[in-house]
Amino acid sequence: MIDFDGLALGPCMQAFGEAVFYEPIDGPGYATAGIFDDAFVPTFPDDGTDLGPTHIVNYAAVLGVQLAQMRALPVQGDNLTVRGAAFTVREARADSRGGMLLMLNFRDDDDDTVPPFTA
């Protein structure tokens, strides 16, 4: 079996990885590395209009991590800081080869929590 983690992910993290401070929900924060991308992606509205991906885009920040460098499996709600910006993990997607893609939301520590819905 091919050691994809050692032969591909490790060298990619060394070449393209950036400093990340990772803060899991359950445990202390720590320094690690990840490959950050803050690309704009097309958004397809489902509202009956003719607007397409050339008219509407969405910001999709993601972080690729090597699981061998993580102290615990990343989960939704974990926090991290990369490039001086704070994010929360919206979704964690394992790739079955020793890596994981973390879908991120911007985190604003100054915002108050949203009150619960009451009717």
Image (cartoon, rainbow, N blue to C red):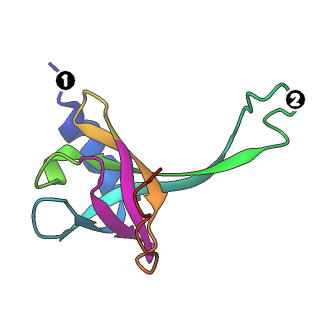
In the picture of the structure, the residue carrying the numbered disc 1 is: 2
Residue 58 lies, in percent from the top left, at 67, 48
Residue 15 quadrant = bottom left
- Characterize the local packing of mark 1: few (<14), some (14-19) or many (20 or more) Cα atoms within 10 angstroms: few
Residue at image position (17%, 70%) is 29
Q: Closest to the observer: 5 or 41?
A: 41
Q: Closest to the observer: 82 or 75?
A: 75
View extreme (front): residue: 119
Q: Is residue 68 above or below residue 94?
A: below
Q: Is residue 66 magenta?
A: no
Marks 2/1: CA–CA distance: 48 Å
Highlighted magenta segment, given as a residue range: 75-91
Residue 89 lies, in percent from the top left, at 36, 53
Residue at image position (34%, 57%) is 34
Q: What amino acid does circle 2 point to?
A: Thr
Q: Is residue 78 magenta?
A: yes
Q: What amino acid does circle 1 point to?
A: Ile
Residue 115 left/right relative to 58: left
Residue 98 quadrant = top left
User: At numbered mark 2, what does the secondary structure look like: helix, strand or loop?
Assistant: loop
Q: Closest to the observer: 85 or 51?
A: 51
- Characterize the local packing of mark 2: few (<14), some (14-19) or many (20 or more) Cα atoms within 10 angstroms: few
Residue 2 left/right relative to 114: left
Q: Is residue 26 above or below residue 10?
A: below
View extreme (top): residue: 1
Residue at image position (72%, 32%) is 44
User: Residue 49 has which mark?
Assistant: 2
Q: Is residue 57 above or below residue 86?
A: above
User: At numbered mark 1, what does the secondary structure look like: helix, strand or loop?
Assistant: loop
Residue 55 left/right relative to 7: right
User: Residue 36 has which mark?
Assistant: none
